[in-house]
Image: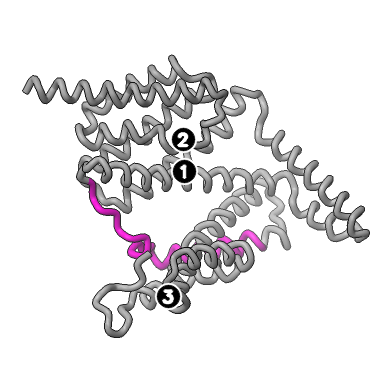
């Protein structure tokens, strides 16, 4: 009993020391490593929580919060606290053997919320600059880029001015907010994936995550997503007189667009793997190219994957195979 308790305390102290060392390293490098440490800082807390559970994890979490204040600067304190909290939630759910896919979605949602809070609130407290400042700087950069394009190509500014008139400050603000949220979701996905890999290397028993292809959202969400995207296009051709309603409609439209695009990329990977090639590197390259060159195709594939029968067709077994297909 005493040995078990001593091991628990020693293990927690070791992981808390690693966390503090990473915070100090970030401070000594002037925040240079902060972009990378965002993915690493949650892991010590997650490893401890998955082994000893929530009650023991809260004590280590408090120590890590104190380490954030002791070894971090003003801007990195929030990163430290939010990363430790993210690790606590992840480790606790794995310790209680919750559904891996629901855990992944929860971590991605928390990543979105924390990223938005950091970019919109903490950044304002630290610098005094709001999102409107970034929007103005973006508009100025766009105008300068269009002027340089006019000087180089000799083309008129009429087309560029029409683009600038569409990309109003409100539109740019909403695009930035959705982009920040998407980046936060990606952070959560990377944290979850890296944590699982490291736990397995440490021989910590964790549930095997289900393949992404096996997650199938309700069909009505695809119809809702395409409806919101169409509404987003309507707001440009026939803007609402009510500004609040216009803002809500465009935010919802962007959310629907990104939702369909996420499943569109999954569908594109499945189509490439089933009908084109089995080379994983080539599949990733082609999927990224489709995202950049043919986003409309990914959008349609996302809708068909969710609300159509594309998901079932991709999951069909090929003739002569015992495995479900594709594995992605």
Residue ranking furthest to the top: 70
Mark 1 and mark 2 residues within 8 Å of each other at the beta carbon: yes
253 vs 209, left or right, is right
What's the distance in space between the residues labelled 3 and 1, CA to CA? 28 Å
Q: Is residue 315 visible?
A: yes
Q: Which badge, 3 or 1, comes first in the chain's sequence?
A: 1
> Which residue is depicted at the point 76% across and 54% down?
166
Left or right: 249, with 327 as reference point: right
Left or right, 227 with respect to 6, comes to right
User: Quadrant of the image for the N terminus?
Assistant: top left
Q: Earlier in the sequence, mark 3 or mark 2?
A: 2
Point out the stretch of residues depicted in magenta: 206-233
Q: Quadrant of residue 61?
A: top left
- Pick whichever, 117 or 277, lies toward us: 277
Residue placed under numbered mark 3 in the picture: 310
Residue 19 in picture, x, y percent from top left = 37, 26
Q: What is the number of the mark on residue 328?
A: none
> Along the line of sight, which residue is nearer the eye, 56 or 72?
72
Residue annotated with mark 2? 38
Q: Residue sitting at 37 percent across and 48 percent down?
A: 193
- The image shows residue 267 at horizontal and vertical percentages of 46, 68
Disc marking residue 187: 1
Alpha carbon separation for disc pair 3 and 2: 36 Å
CA neighbours of label 1 inside 10 A, class few (<14), some (14 to 19), many (20+): many
Give the image location of residue 161, x and y in percent.
85, 54
């Amino acid at each position: 009993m005493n040995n078990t308790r001593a091991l628990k305390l020693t293990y927690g102290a070791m992981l808390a020391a690693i966390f503090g060392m990473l915070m100090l390293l970030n401070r000594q490098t002037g925040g240079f490593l902060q972009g990378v440490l965002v993915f690493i800082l949650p892991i010590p807390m997650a490893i401890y929580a998955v082994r000893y559970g929530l009650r023991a994890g809260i004590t280590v979490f408090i120590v890590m919060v104190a380490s954030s204040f002791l070894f971090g600067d003003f801007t990195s304190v929030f990163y430290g606290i939010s990363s430790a909290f993210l690790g606590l939630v992840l480790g606790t759910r794995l310790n209680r053997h919750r559904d891996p896919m629901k855990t992944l979605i929860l971590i991605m949602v928390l990543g979105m919320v924390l990223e938005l809070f950091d970019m919109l609130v903490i950044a304002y407290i630290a610098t005094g600059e709001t999102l409107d400042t970034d929007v103005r700087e973006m508009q100025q950069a766009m105008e300068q880029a269009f002027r340089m394009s006019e000087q180089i190509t000799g083309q008129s500014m009429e087309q560029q001015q029409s683009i600038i008139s569409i990309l109003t400050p409100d539109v740019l603000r909403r695009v930035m907010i959705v982009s920040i949220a998407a980046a936060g979701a990606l952070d959560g996905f990377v944290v979850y994936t890296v944590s699982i890999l490291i736990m397995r290397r440490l021989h910590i028993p964790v549930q095997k995550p289900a393949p992404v292809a096996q997650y199938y959202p309700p069909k009505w969400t695809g119809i809702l997503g395409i409806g919101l995207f169409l509404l987003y296009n309507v707001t440009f051709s026939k803007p609402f007189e009510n500004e609040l309603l216009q803002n809500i409609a465009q935010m919802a439209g962007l959310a629907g667009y990104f939702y369909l695009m996420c499943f569109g990329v999954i569908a594109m990977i499945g189509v490439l793997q089933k009908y084109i090639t089995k080379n994983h590197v080539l599949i990733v390259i082609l999927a990224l190219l489709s995202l950049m060159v043919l986003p409309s195709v990914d959008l349609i594939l996302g809708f068909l994957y969710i609300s159509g029968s594309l998901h079932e067709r991709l999951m069909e077994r090929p003739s002569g195979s015992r495995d479900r297909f594709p594995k992605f």
